[in-house]
Amino acid sequence: MKDKDNPMLEVRDLKVSYGAIRALLGISLKVTRGEIVCVIGANGAGKSTLMKAIMGEVKRESGEILFEGKPLPPIPYEVVSLGISLVPEGRRVFANLTVYENLLMGAFPRKDRENIKSDLEWVYSLFPRLKERNNQYAGTLSGGEQQMLSIARGLMSRPKILLLDEPSLGLAPLLVKEIFKELKRINQEGVTILLVEQNAKQALNISHRGYVLQTGRIVLEGSSRELLEKEEVVRSYLGETKASREDLKDRTR
Amino acid sequence: MESLIQQIINGLSLGSVYALIAVGYSLVYSILLFSNFAHGGFLVTGGYICYYMLTLTNNNIWVAGALSLIGAGLSAIATERLAYKPIREKTNLTLYLLIASMGMSIVIENFWVIMAGGRFRALPPVIPTYPIRIGSITISFFDILVFLITIAFLTGLEFFLQRTRWGLAIRAAAYDLRVAGLMGVNVNKLISLVFFLAGLLAAVSGIFLSVRYTLYPQLGFITIKAFVAAVVGGLGSLRGAVIGSLILGTAEMLTAGFISSQLRDVVVFGALVVTLLFKPTGLLGKAISEKV
Ligand SMILES: Nc1ncnc2c1ncn2[C@@H]1O[C@H](COP(=O)(O)OP(=O)(O)O)[C@@H](O)[C@H]1O
Ligand SMILES: [Mg+2]
């Protein structure tokens, strides 16, 4: 019962810098068990830095990151073994390995080796296309298939929480829809999700709550429904004014 | 005709020694993307451990050999922990690693100058080198042995890389070390494992070279030729390293046998120049674009 009220993942006043560049200026957020939470922000807002800080890939200047009430060690493999898995920006599948081997890599830290087979079936049921391409090199997959593989690989460690860094990046709108639908299903099957995105509308559509990140600060937070209602405000924080959107339309025409 | 076959067998034997060096060197390169110039030091360390253990064990090559491989593997791990790990934890620039490895190569060489002295030492005759006759061809038993043992070690390595969990992790890390870490691999442990394997294979070649020539602290210089073989075969590709080594060893012995012994090194470095001019990625090297 206690678990239900306490956040699964909590970030408190986190600051991260790269030398003189201050990427995160003290951000706080919570993810409760069972939720999909999104953090939306424009390019350079600090989304990837947040993910890397949780995984222990970048040094924290100050602040705390708690997982199930305990501070997270800043060591990636330990973070993974505690039940956190990151689907990195840009998919980053192992192009030199087959689809099957990529999935096995996802299961690397698992002690219960005997359950890996049934989890393979689970991720194949989520993404049937991966099963068809089982013995193909990941480098030969299309962008959408690589994203599916990257997510499936992230699930193979059986994480309690799945972090995703811009899964919609570089994908056609129809594919984004398909992948986000699967994320919702993954969540319904018991995986808590923290998603960072530039694609505000899609991310808010599938999530329960959202935070808006602007140049290293959280400037807005609320339930996804509320944030969707304030779409224009959210867009302005993303640097997308109506004018700039029309401008973009003009330029792409 | 007979001497041609003899030179080819000679060349394959020499190429095998290069292959043992080049594969370990390539393995390290594929993970950390720098040329480890201290690799020759691992070979020399293996040679000296074998030499001293032979005296201690009354010329038991099995025990001395095993201790040599393990010792050289551990010395490779120590080199990485001492000189490379502090650097790679601070920067992504591999140039610093390269320079540190040049330093470590000097450190290891001088360690053996101090410990063993600079003179040339012959290993006791524990590995048979007598000639054997097949029809009208005379070949050295040692050359055949070198070739077969090399095949055994490289097959073992291939089995490890293809069939085991850590082998898979090494292949994944060769493509993307960061993401291998995100998969829950202890990256420092993986790098130590890779250095251990590199040191172990280098020790095998160190023993062979000590028998073939003699053992001295600068013996590691021969790794330059194995590096060339790795580049000719395609940097980072283990198969390429083996093929490049066999080609280079054979070309070297054919040159020595039929043209002039003085020209053998010219052929080796000629192969490097030709590769860099016409196919910089080597015979089996991955195109850069594949890595993006
Ligand atoms: N390795 C790095 N070195 C220096 N600056 C960086 C590095 N990574 C990111 N930054 C900077 O930190 C800020 C946040 O970057 P990032 O977290 O990648 O943003 P996002 O993922 O939201 O696009 C940006 O200003 C970016 O230029
Ligand atoms: Mg990013």
Image (spheres, grey):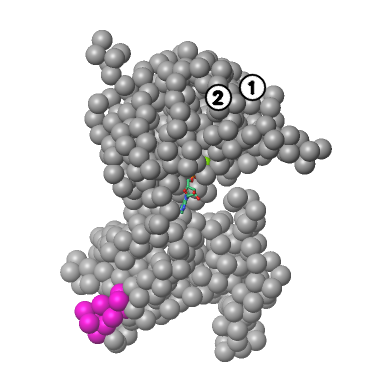
Amino acid type at circle 1 is Lys
The dot on residue A203 is: 2
CA distance for labels 1 and 2: 10 Å
- The secondary structure type at the circle numbered 2 is helix
Which residue is depicted at the point 68% across and 37% down? A244
The relative height of residue B200 versus residue A105 in the rendered view (above or below) is below
Instruction: Reply yes or no: does residue A163 show up in magenta.
Output: no
Q: Nearer the viewer, residue A147 or B143?
A: A147
* Dominant secondary structure, magenta: helix
User: From this viewpoint, which residue is outermost toward the right?
Assistant: A253
Whether pointer 1 and pointer 2 mark residues with C-beta atoms closer than 8 Å, the reply is no
The dot on residue A177 is: 1
Q: In this rendering, would A109 be left or right of A91?
A: left
User: From this viewpoint, which residue is outermost toward the top?
Assistant: A1
Question: Would residue B141 be seen by someone viewing this image from the given angle?
Answer: no
**Horizontal and vertical percent position of residue A4:** 30, 13
First in residue order: circle 1 vs circle 2: 1
Q: In this rendering, would B226 be left or right of B289?
A: left
**Horizontal and vertical percent position of residue A48:** 47, 40
Q: Provide the chain ID for the residue under circle 2.
A: A
**Horizontal and vertical percent position of residue B82:** 28, 64
Amino acid type at circle 2 is Ala
Residue B271 lies in quadrant: bottom right
The dot on residue B26 is: none
- The secondary structure type at the circle numbered 1 is helix
Q: Nearer the viewer, residue A5 or B171?
A: A5
Highlighted magenta segment, given as a residue range: B107-117
The relative height of residue B291 versus residue B106 in the rendered view (above or below) is above
Q: Is mark 1 within 8 Å of ligand 2?
A: no
Which residue is depicted at the point 36% across and 25% down? A30
Question: Would residue A13 be seen by someone viewing this image from the given angle?
Answer: yes
Instruction: Reply yes or no: does residue B111 show up in magenta.
Output: yes
